[in-house]
Amino acid sequence: MRLSTRVFLAFALFLAAITFLHGGLNHGWFAERTRPRLTVAHLPVT
Amino acid sequence: MTCPVTSWVTEHSEAGTVFESKRYTNWPAMTEDIQAGNLHAAFILAPLAMVLAREGTKPVKIVHLGHRDGTCMVVAKDSPYRTFADLRGKRIAIPHRFSNQRILIERLKEQAGFADGDVTLIDFPPPEMPAGLKAGQFEAYIVGEPHAARAEIGDFGRILYYTKDVWPNFISCVLVVTQELIDTQPELVQELVSGITASGEWIDDGPQDQLVAGIFVEGETPVGGPEPEGGKEPGEAGAPRTLTIPREFGLSPRMQAAQIGGLYYGQPPELLKYVLSKPPDRVKYTDLALNRADFEEIQRYAERLGFFAKRPITAADPFGFTDYCDDRFERGRARSLPLRETPQVGATQNPEAGQ
């Protein structure tokens, strides 16, 4: 295999790994924040 | 208390809606936020909810109760007042002119044979009532807990009446949501109502040997976040994700609720423990369904007292239970709370000591 092909494949592998890692971290970080939220107001009375 | 517990439980669940509790110190600020469209769910006074449903720019509906009873009339500890009749000519603080506490005063006035001007009613923010009594700004006040217990524990106030003794199953606060929320996200309203019901059933009838998610016994290693820090509201960054309870505080659902409520209300858990146990029927969290007869009685008094003066109720412009209540969500699906067995760490002491 030519050196240029090997460099290209290594770079493609590197990009794929970074993308996968970024996606996973992103999902883990934002999963909680994507849950629906609703504010419920109250006074400090029982 | 059902509001903080529901908020805590959803914060500690993996799925579903997170109900974020937001604390206000007075009713006008809360109603302004509802009318401005910035708030879609709130626990507010029952007659005030009716007035908002009748006259508000943002229509709301009552979908559930928050609790029953839990209101007391307080006088100074060393005062001569023993019955309501002794308060003729005196000043009584009420939480709002459109409150069920005011309606209760009207009922007591009728029973004592008072004329309209025989007592002076003063609108006063609930958290400031104990200080007002101590300063002599009025001779009595009527309010939801824990602001009656604060005067008792402070040793300057005495309970003249518990609502459970003068108007059993008294309704103070109700859960309202905007009609817009009902129309656009009914499933979310359903989830909230089911959560409030489940929280109430757990507080009153929950298993005594289980802990709700996020609560640990002293001696356990908390899992799920840092230990509580002071000065942070639940839900805020850096706010407590777990609570550790000393075994001697008590581990029953009511004692766990006292700890959770302490965080959300900014009140000492010991004060809420007192409210929830002295006596235990001082406040109830079951039987929260909307009962037509209860609301019709409140409405009768509300009409008589002129609560709907801006838009009077007439034959041509009627107003009834279904105009301000929507009970369909109470028939929805049940919900259970995330519970686990109480571990036996340091279980040599009486687990319910002090209750």
Image: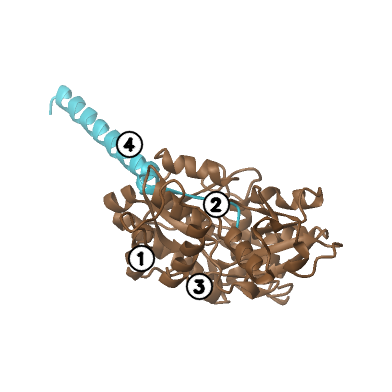
Chain colours: A cyan, B brown
- Marks 4/3 in contact by CB < 8 Å: the verdict is no
Amino acid beneath label 4: His
Cα gap from disc 2 to disc 4, whole angstroms: 27 Å
Q: In x, y percent, where is residue B91?
A: 73, 53
Of badges 2 and 3, nearer the viewer stands 3
Of badges 2 and 1, nearer the viewer stands 1
Which residue is the site of mark 2?
A: B241
Upstream in the sequence, badge 2 or badge 3? 2
Res B46 seen here: no
Secondary structure under the numbered disc 1 in the rendered image: helix
Which residue is the site of mark 1?
A: B327
Q: Dot 1 surroundings within 10 Å: few (below 14), some, or many (20 or more)?
A: some
Which residue is the site of mark 4?
A: A22
Label 2 resides on the chain identified as B
Circles 2 and 1 on the same subunit: yes
- Marks 1/3 in contact by CB < 8 Å: the verdict is no
As drawn, B146 above or below B32: below
Of badges 1 and 3, nearer the viewer stands 1
Label 1 resides on the chain identified as B
Q: How many marks?
A: 4
Amino acid beneath label 1: Asp
Cα gap from disc 2 to disc 1, whole angstroms: 33 Å
Q: Is residue B332 left or right of residue B111?
A: left
